[in-house]
Structure formats: structure tokens, C-alpha cells
């Protein structure tokens, strides 16, 4: 999966015409989101709301962290472009869509691959998953903006 998401990162970086600075900022955003993901998964696991089919060894956690980085970095580049093109309203739409589609994705994955992930019944685990997706997008974009600067100040502004 890490390899597949790395390929996705390269494709998204090319399609969004990302500069080296933006790619680095997206990786930093992904690294921060990776720490958030590990913390939230631990909380959900402890609460009994979600269970991942991984062993909680340092090697597994490191691989999960790396997966989170390469999964989130392309999203950071996409939200960068959305914010550049549509402003904060476009970014708000992306955040809302992530809050809805994220739990749908995870519920589908839990139904299709129960050996990988199980989600407890009830509304609160789904709400927690949705809030996590929202937090991931917001944190990743905020960190990328802090590192690379505002998308409106991008040198490609007006080119698309």
C-alpha cells in the first residue's frame, strides 16, 4: 500500500504542478497527520470502537505512520489546489465531503475486509471516524500552508 500511495503522490504532484517546496510541505503535513492518525487509532482501539488487524509493534506502527504520510501528502496537494482555485469555500466543501465519505469508505472496508478493520456498531464510532477525517484534512492543509505559505501567494496563481 505504501508503494501504491507513493505512486499516487508522484501522479498528484505532477498533475497539480507542485513545486519542490509544496511537495516538501505536503510531506510535513502528512507527517503531522500521521501522528494524529496513530493517536486517534489508539483512542478508538482503547474505547473499543474500532480495531485494526495489525500488531501494535514498533515496526507495524512505523509502517502505519509511513502509510499515513504518503496517503495524506497527495490530499494536501489537492486541498492546496482547491484552496487556490475556490478559496475557503472550496476547502470547506472538501472538508465536509471528507467527513461524510471517510466513514463510508471505512464502513465499506470493514464489511469487505473484516480481517483488516472492524468498527463497533452505533453512531458514535462513525461520528468519531468522520471527525478524524475532517481533522486530517484540516491539519494537513494548515501545516502545508504554514510551511509553503498561502496558496494565493503561489507563483502559479492565475495560470490555471
Image (tube, rainbow, N blue to C red):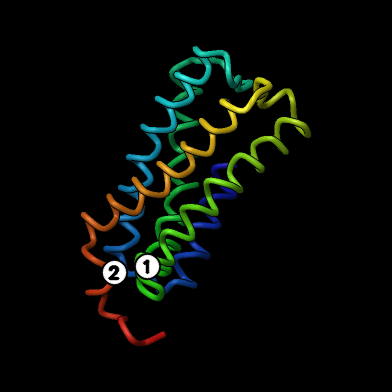
Mark 2, other Cα within 10 Å: few <14 / some 14–19 / many ≥20: many
What residue sits 64% from the left and 21% below the top?
53
> Does residue 79 sit above or below 45 in this rendering?
below
Q: Which residue is mark 2?
A: 151
Mark 1, other Cα within 10 Å: few <14 / some 14–19 / many ≥20: many
What residue sits 65% from the left and 43% below the top?
105
Q: Position of residue 61 (x, y in %)?
A: 46, 24
Would you say 152 lies left or right of 34 here? Answer: left
Q: Which residue is mark 1?
A: 83
- Quarter of the image with the C terminus in it: bottom left
Q: Position of residue 70 (x, y in %)?
A: 46, 47
User: SS class of the residue under badge 1?
Assistant: helix
- Quarter of the image with the N terminus in it: top right
Answer whether labels 1 and 2 touch (C-beta < 8 Å): yes
Choose top left, top right, bottom left or bottom right for residue 120: top right
- Front in this rendered view, residue 122 or 105: 122
Q: Kindly report the distance in space between the C-alpha atoms of the residues bearing marks 1 and 2.
A: 7 Å
Would you say 155 lies left or right of 64 here? Answer: left
> Does residue 69 sit above or below 23 in this rendering?
above
Q: Position of residue 82 (x, y in %)?
A: 43, 68
User: SS class of the residue under badge 2?
Assistant: helix
> Does residue 117 sit above or below 48 in this rendering?
below
What residue sits 40% from the left and 66% below the top?
89
Q: Residue extending furthest front?
A: 123
Q: Position of residue 144 (x, y in %)?
A: 29, 55
Q: Earlier in the sequence, mark 1 or mark 2?
A: 1
Amino acid at each position: 500500500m505504501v508503494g501504491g500511495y507513493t505512486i499516487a503522490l508522484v501522479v498528484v504532484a505532477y498533475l497539480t504542478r507542485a513545486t519542490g517546496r509544496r511537495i516538501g510541505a505536503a510531506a510535513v503535513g502528512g507527517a503531522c497527520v500521521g501522528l494524529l492518525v496513530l493517536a486517534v487509532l489508539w483512542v478508538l482501539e482503547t474505547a473499543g470502537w474500532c480495531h485494526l488487524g495489525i500488531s501494535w509493534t514498533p515496526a507495524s506502527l512505523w509502517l502505519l505512520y509511513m502509510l499515513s504520510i504518503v496517503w495524506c501528502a497527495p490530499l494536501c496537494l489537492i486541498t492546496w489546489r482547491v484552496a487556490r482555485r475556490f478559496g475557503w469555500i472550496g476547502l470547506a466543501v472538501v472538508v465536509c465531503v471528507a467527513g461524510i465519505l471517510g466513514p463510508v469508505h471505512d464502513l465499506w472496508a470493514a464489511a469487505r475486509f473484516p480481517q483488516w478493520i472492524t468498527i463497533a456498531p452505533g453512531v458514535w464510532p462513525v461520528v468519531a471516524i468522520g471527525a478524524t477525517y475532517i481533522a486530517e484534512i484540516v491539519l494537513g492543509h494548515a501545516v502545508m500552508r504554514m510551511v509553503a505559505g498561502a496558496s494565493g501567494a503561489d507563483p502559479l496563481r492565475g495560470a490555471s
